[in-house]
Image (cartoon, rainbow, N blue to C red):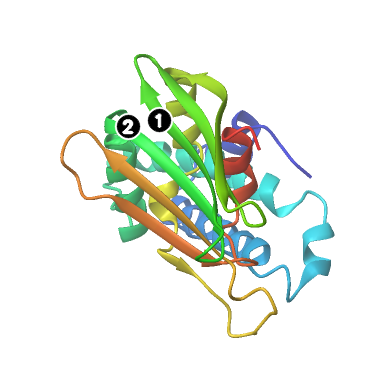
Amino acid sequence: MMISPEGFYELELKGKSVKEIRRVIRDLKRTIKENKDILENSDVIPEKVMVHPGPSVMISLSRDYLEIAIKALMENGEEYKPTKSELRDMEFNNNIEYIDKISYTYGNFFFPETVSAELVDDKFVLNYRKHIRDEDRCIEEVYDSIDRTDFMEGLKKLHLGEWKKRYTSEIQYIDDMIDWTLEISYSNGLKNEVFKGDGHMEPYNFDELMELFRL
């Protein structure tokens, strides 16, 4: 049964010892990881995606619960040490305001399709580019724009700092020659972030990124 973050605090954290709170934190992290694995390997275990509440909901709720649990730990005078993954995510979010362009490219080497979000004044302008094979030409068009603040908030919710750099599978598929690439560039001199994957292998919340791109 799903409960609110406030209800979770009352049930699982209020009046608990530091040891008990740390156990809750470990369990929540395990839940997040297990549900990420389910979504990122759903081609192997699709039946597990159909459970209720679904993996995406479980991840979202567990993140909310985890935030409260960490706060409860610190209120008990204990230090919380973030994992390497959490530190990467914190670093990524600290630099989100400097992002000036994100490009998503999908397809084979010769005929890729690219969607980009580029900062222009106070908006991210969304542009689509595709090579027309039969006509040997490219089409390119601006199809939407998003307020800069709204776009940044959407990116924070994706926790891109936790993503792996490469998503691939040992199982071979007919579309293995079709890859995707996500590249993020910054205005403050930071090195570009690049994420890649086989056509069928994606991060657990990739659909949310596509929604941000209005796709």
Q: Nearer the viewer, residue 153 or 24?
A: 153
Image mark for residue 118: 1
Taking 144 as reference, is 198 above or below it?
below
* Left or right, 208 with reference to 154: right
Residue 32 relative to residue 83: left or right: right
- Residue 69 image label: none
Determine if residue 65 is in view: no
Amino acid of disc 1:
Glu
Tell me the element at label 1.
strand
Q: Please, what is the three-letter code of the amino acid marked with disc 2?
A: Asp
Badge 1 crowding class, 10 Å Cα cut-off, few under 14, some 14 to 19, many 20 or more, is many
Residue 100 numbered mark, or none:
2
Q: Is residue 38 above or below residue 96?
A: below
The mark nearer the N terminus, 1 or 2, is 2
The answer to whether residue 115 is visible is: yes
Crowd class of label 2 (few under 14; some 14 to 19; many from 20; radius 10 Å): some
Percent coordinates x, y for residue 173 in the rendering: 68, 80
Left or right of residue 165: residue 13:
right
How far from the left and from the top, in percent, is residue 130? 57, 46
What residue is rendered at 53% in x and 21% in y? 145
Q: Mark 1 and mark 2 in contact? Answer it, CB < 8 Å.
A: yes
* Quadrant in the picture for the C terminus: top right
Residue at 36% over, 45% down: 184
- Residue in the foreground of this view, choosing between 60 and 40: 40
Q: Residue furthest left?
A: 189
In the figure, residue 162 lies in which quadrant?
Answer: bottom left
The x, y position of residue 2, in whole percent, is 74, 41
How far apart are the two marked residues, 1 and 2, measured between alpha carbons?
6 Å
